[in-house]
Amino acid sequence: MKKLFFLVFFLAFCLKTTSAKVFDAEEFYLDNGLRIIVVENHRAPIVKMMLWYKVGAMDEVAGKSGLAHLLEHLMFRGTTKVPASFFNQLMLQNGVDFNAFTSKDFTVYHALADISRLELVLALEADRMKNLQIDDQAFVGEQKIVYQERQQRIENNPQSLFYEEALNILWNNTPYGHPVAGTLAEIEALTKEDARLFYRSFYHPNNAVLVLSGDIDVKTAQILVEKYFGKIKNTKEKPVQLPVKNKRNGTYQITKELNEVQSTKISLSYIINSVIDDERRAFALSVFSSYFGGSSNSYMKRHLIKPQKVVSAQSSVDIFSRFMGVFNISVLPKPELSDDQNVKMLEDTINEALQGFSLQDLEAEKKKMLSWFVYTKDNPKEAAYIVGQMAALGMSLEKIENYEKLIEDVTLDDVKSSVENMINSAARMIAVVKPLQRKNNQ
Amino acid sequence: MIRQNLKLILGNILFLGLLVYALCLFFVRANSFNADEIVAKSILADKNFSVKVEEIISPQGHKAWMVEDHSLGLVAINFYFKNAGYAFEDEKKRGLGNFVSKLLTYGAGPYDDEKLHDILDMNAIELDFSVNSDDFNVSMTVPVKNLETGVRLLNLILTNPHFNKADIEVVRLQILEAIRMQSEQPERVLQQAFKKAFYNNHPKSRDSFGTSQSIQSLSQEDMFSFIENHFRKEDLVIALAGDLSPQNAADVIDQLFKGLKDKKNNFLQSELQPQYHFEKKNIERDIPQILARFILPGVERLDKDFYALYIATEIFGGSGLTSRLNLEAREKEGLTYGAYAFLNPEKGAPRVEGGFATSKENYEKMEEILFSLVSKMAGKGVTKEEFEAVKSSMLTSFNLRFKSLSDISSMLLYMQKEDLGLDFLQKRNEYVSKTTLEDVNKASYKFFNQKPSLITIGKM
């Protein structure tokens, strides 16, 4: 391991001379496959710890929706060494700000701690990587709690429920085709054995990335991580992740009138390649999204909002995903136009924006995007998130440090061809949600 | 012979016993998790970290609090104009402050909307304007190399914004839509209803967005008179953090507020008469859960009972999963994804405020748990273990507040607003340490000794 450690160091050193690094991070691997990235920030004696497991709702088999998320909850309910809620109790006593989240792609455990408590945080995190104990009472309790969470976060708000449904249709028959929160019936049908199996299959050092961001150097990190995670056995092979099922084609449309919804909203989503499949195009689309509806002088602001053709409009991309990415446009339309007319106007606007997109526009937009990188190290929480997400996708540290260059390198041709490709052949979803009856006075 | 055998057997038993004991000891030691020992023996010891807050007075007489931090070449500036919040708005001009906050970056001085945003984006200048019930808040974060540009632009925005009529209409539409959308979210509806019940008819019960009628009637003239009335030197409270010296900071402040008028306006607020006891009320809505808000009386920030009641409230319903509310309602019964309570020390209306969400069928049980835990706080107080845990949490989490420059800068602003003193950061842990179990229990008896008032939304 030491050799590998040295080699990575050496490579990192060589890279330093060629281009500016975004994070100045260092990385090393344990023999068991755990990947560790350290981002130093010595403003205050605190550290953000993030442990990214490369498992999420997309790894759930049919009929088991909500399992990844339920397991995340169970991870706070005790191990053979730290039983019941002692984990939470210890975190409290030691002033650690901790939580976890589950997405379609990842399950992430994170904590912000005083430097004097980092060793304890690592010890506890390592302990629950291998010693989780799932007892009946905790299992049934957490099943109820995640159901309450689902109601609170999604079902209380008809609009959230609607978007969940729209996404299920868009991603139907793919690994993203069911909600992270799980459906009620499937949450109820989950068993302790399901959770145990999921834990055994995916919670391994070689299926995780640990990020330490803050007042710590790589040497100290190495000693501590080795001490607590070093003993955890490696699984011989990487866990089997689900094969990618058929990709999507065509247009899906869903329109609903809902009680309690007060204003019409239109959301247009295209399925695009993520950075893993097509880095060039993914970054080209992210530059275009910023130009079209992301930055404060966006094309849509100039051509739709200010001339009062719509009330508001934004676009965004999600390219850091394990399966596929999304290019989304969200609009609050004005009531004068029909839904179809609004959608047509949006499509025409993308086309016009693309036709007029010049080299000058490209360079200006890239410059704007790059200017914000100056803040990446201001908050150790944000640095940990960005680095962790990219690393968990399997991107090399060299790539992560070259984040700026990936944007700089986007050419006019990249943008033109990737946007054209998207509008002409990507699967897309048009989702419209509107008030149950349009009131006359509005 | 027998005796000898017996001796041997006894000896063996003794030996075996010892062996088993030793093995057990070994096993337990190897398998037990000793958190205190890990912390005590950690190679990462406590760092004696202290942040010095300085008070500076600029040549023009502006006072500001600042922290120097040269680690990243960034600067954060936060300030607010006192008594410019929505509770001070004229009845007919409700929502004016929020409207202005959304319009300020639509052009200033020689720059139109587009040019202004271009410069901000190219120079990574982050600007934010917002109102709360008391004040009008402004924050700027900027790389030190672009500080001059940032200061110049923000000065133009404060002294010479355009408020173009066409832009006013664009923003007006957005605010009207935002007002409409408020009622889509049950939490927002509940929050508004809670404010109405608690503040009674006081202007603090208003929504910062205003009403559809008031927004429709606001004019360009109103926007200009808002900044004329409120952007005044004497109403400023200022904080800075980052890569600059006190001398630089003083110059920056003078440039930033150059051209603001001197004379102070007197915007007074009618006295608050908060209602701690109101009838339980439900807002009917067909959703799967019932969402609840509850309150009990509390204390203000500088009250002698502040830390005691803060600790009691943390034990009762603090943010972690180990509060009494969460242990009982969440972990033990699985009734809710979470229940919380916190001490809100608002001047003139201090309170312990809390809430939860639970399915209709769980509601009654949930309410029962809430009431019984409240009366347990009043009857038996808290245990020594609970007290020590929360106290230790408050002490060890102290440094987490320094995570970003804007966190530091906005904390300096809060310290001034609440009169915590220039040396608060040095004294704070002392204040916590000095608080005793008796103090906490006294506060617990005093403030939890009543039924909380409740307001809910859902289908009862």
Image (cartoon, coloured by chain):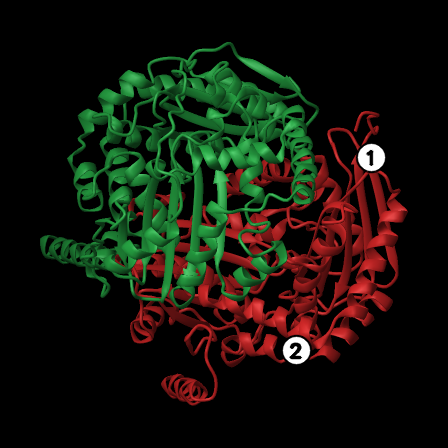
Chain colours: A red, B green
| Relative depth, front residue between B316 and A89 | B316
Identify which residue, B326 or A43, lies in the foreground: A43
The amino acid type, in three-letter code, at marker 1 is Glu
Give the chain of mark 2.
A
The first of marks 2 and 1 along the sequence is 1
Depth check, mark 2 against mark 1: the one in front is: 2
Residue B336: give x, y in percent of width and height. 54, 32
Q: Nearer the viewer, residue A381 or B88?
A: B88
In the depicted structure, whether residue A21 falls above or below residue A365: below
Q: Which mark is residue A257?
A: 1
Instruction: Give the left or right position of residue A68, taking residue B180 as reference.
Output: left
Q: Quadrant of the C terminus of chain B?
A: top right
Q: Closer to the camera, A109 or B415? A: B415
Q: Which residue sits furthest top?
A: B279
Element marked by disc 1: strand
- Judged from the image, the secondary structure of the residue bearing numbered disc 2 is loop
What residue is shown at x 20% (from left), y 54% (from top)? B50
The label on residue A410 is: 2
Residue B447: % across, % down: 31, 18
Residue in the picture at 50% in, 39% down: A137
